[in-house]
Image (cartoon, grey):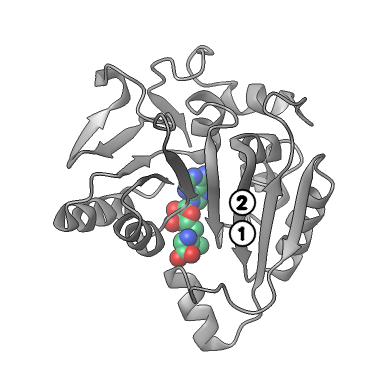
């Protein structure tokens, strides 16, 4: 099923094709942070409120969550937050500049345990380039999961990625539970794996699996240049 990518920015909804300029660029001289799978937006909204000088881009496939978050952002008058309803892998592959984000946040991503769904994983060997590749040199990926097996697999993929430094965060984040899932799992006493992964590579360094971008966009509308008016996500 193909559905249009929806974008919320500056207090209202847009379609990508209606925007004169691609909205996902890191602002000149500013910071860009991305959250993938933001759920009801607890972390994204709190961060956008607390750090108005940083642009936050949230990507979420679930339309109801996207709408709830936009309503909350509108009530708070946030102007430094862009939310996109669409598939993160597609957006990373087709719409975002490599090496353009200062931080990427991924908290409690769906683990896709069935083998036939593995290609949807953000940290599969074939897709990890898209996630790590969007980080600027020195940029940091923050990751958390309560799935021990999935967490171990993600840690292994990231530890094997050239020019990254992977660190397990012992205990909680310094700012406490960041998302609704994290708060719930902490209350339940579930073990949580938290990782901080710094990208050391210079921009433009060779990708580990350059076919990942092609694989993700294959089957979508014809390949487009980065930031070039993409308006469809495949589910
Ligand atoms: C388990 S929930 C975690 C939500 C939130 N991060 C939290 O910790 O409370 C996973 C979220 O990721 C979203 N999601 C799953 N696959 C996605 C994708 N490919 N792109 C963007 N969001 C995705 C789901 O809709 C869901 O809201």
Q: Is residue 189 left or right of residue 166?
A: left
Asked which quadrant contains residue 173, the reply is bottom right
Which image quarter: residue 98?
Answer: top right
- Badge 1 crowding class, 10 Å Cα cut-off, few under 14, some 14 to 19, many 20 or more, is many
**59, above or below 233, in the image:** below
Identified at 26% across, 39% down, the residue is 8
Note whether 97 is above or below 47 in the view shown: above
Between marks 2 and 1, how big is the CA–CA gap? 6 Å
Decide: marks 2, 1 in contact (CB < 8 A)? Answer: yes
Residue at 15 percent of width and 57 percent of height = 75
The residue nearer to you, when weighing 170 against 96, is: 170
Circle 2 or circle 1, nearest the eye: 2
Q: Which mark is residue 143?
A: 1
**Image position of 219 (left or right of 19):** right
The residue shown at (30%, 19%) is 17
Element under label 1? strand
Work out which residue is located at the far front of the displayed protein and give it. Answer: 29
Q: Is residue 25 above or below residue 87?
A: above
> Residue 105 in the image: x percent, y percent?
53, 53
Residue 180 location, x and y as percent?
42, 71
Q: Give the numbered dot on residue 178.
A: none
Q: Is residue 166 left or right of residue 12?
A: right
Instruction: Say which residue label 2 marks.
Output: 141
């Amino acid at each position: 099923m193909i559905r249009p990518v929806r974008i919320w920015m500056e207090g209202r909804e847009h379609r990508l094709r209606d925007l004169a300029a691609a909205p996902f660029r890191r602002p000149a001289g500013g910071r860009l942070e991305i959250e993938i799978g933001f759920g009801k937006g607890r972390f994204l909204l709190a961060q956008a409120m607390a750090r108005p000088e940083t642009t936050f881009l949230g990507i979420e496939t679930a339309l109801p969550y996207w709408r709830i978050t936009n309503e909350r952002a509108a009530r708070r008058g946030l102007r430094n937050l862009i939310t996109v309803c669409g598939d993160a892998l597609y957006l990373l592959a087709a719409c975002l500049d490599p090496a353009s984000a200062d931080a990427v946040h991924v908290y409690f991503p769906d683990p896709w345990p069935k083998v036939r769904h593995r290609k949807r994983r953000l940290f599969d060997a074939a897709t990890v380039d898209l996630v790590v590749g969007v980080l600027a040199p020195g940029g940091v990926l923050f990751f958390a999961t309560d799935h021990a097996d999935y967490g171990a697999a993600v840690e292994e993929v990231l530890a094997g990625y050239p020019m990254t430094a992977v660190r397990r965060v012992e205990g909680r984040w310094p700012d406490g539970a960041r998302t609704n899932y994290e708060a719930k799992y902490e209350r339940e006493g579930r073990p949580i794996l938290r990782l901080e992964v710094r990208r050391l590579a210079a921009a433009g360094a060779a990708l580990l699996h350059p076919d990942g971008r092609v694989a993700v966009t294959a089957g979508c509308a014809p390949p487009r240049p980065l930031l070039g008016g993409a308006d469809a996500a495949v589910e």
